[in-house]
Amino acid sequence: EVVKYGLLGDRAFFGWLEQNWQSVFGNDVQAMTHVIETSCTAKAGIVTRDEIESGERALLNLGHTFGHALEAWTGYSDRLLHGEGVAIGTVLAFRLSEELGLCPAGTSQRVETHFRAVGLPTTIKDIRGFETADENELVRLMGQDKKVVRGQLTLILVRDIGEAFITRDVSAARVRSFLAGQLS
């Protein structure tokens, strides 16, 4: 949850987390205070600017469209916890952004490296039983997301770390092709 605020709109905070995550995990009071203040301020800013959830607030769902589909695919079981699904979904959003030429090459690797350092899964292949995953089923499950508008997937993608945006311009066919590549 905390890293999301760096990835959404605060590149410097993400960099700080990369350097200081062990202090955060070690419950260092100064580090924890910084993380809590930064995260609360970021979330409050987004919620205040979009109290009725008509736009910018959807950014808080970074990684969730992919993540919720993965959770549904695993039957909401202990094979994939919510935070793990969102972590994988976030890396997928960064990878798709790279594939679409929206953000610099290597950006997703940086996010993946950080998630792996803190012990989170980062690929569909990290899920037990991934061999049975099917891109068609995953796209179908993504289509059930609450953010789908008139049959169009709503994705949170990125131009870089700290530069997330909302789009409905990526077709289900393109997402299916992307997921097929992630499963191979």
Image (cartoon, helix red, strand yellow):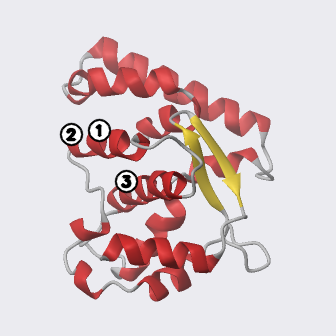
- Kind of residue at disc 3: Ala
73 lies above or below 120: below
- Kind of residue at disc 1: His
Where is residue 49 shown, x and y percent of the image?
78, 35
Residue pictured at 43% horizontal, 82% vertical:
135
Residue pictured at 72% horizontal, 74% vertical:
152
Q: Choose top left, top right, bottom left or bottom right for residue 144.
A: bottom right
Q: Residues within 10 Å of mark 3 (few under 14, many from 20)?
A: many
The residue singled out by tag 2 in the image is 117
Q: Residues within 10 Å of mark 1 (few under 14, many from 20)?
A: many
Reading the chain from its start, which is encountered first: label 3 or label 1?
3
The mark tally for this picture is 3
Residue at disc 2, secondary structure: helix
The Cα atoms of the two marked residues, 3 and 1, are separated by: 10 Å
Taking the image as shown, residue 171 lies to the left or right of residue 29, namely right
Closest to the camera, between mark 3 and mark 1, is: 1
- Identify the disc placed on residue 114: 1
136 lies above or below 46: below
User: Where does the N terminus fall, quadrant-wise?
Assistant: top left
Residue at disc 1, secondary structure: helix
The residue singled out by tag 3 in the image is 87
Residue at disc 3, secondary structure: helix
The Cα atoms of the two marked residues, 3 and 2, are separated by: 12 Å
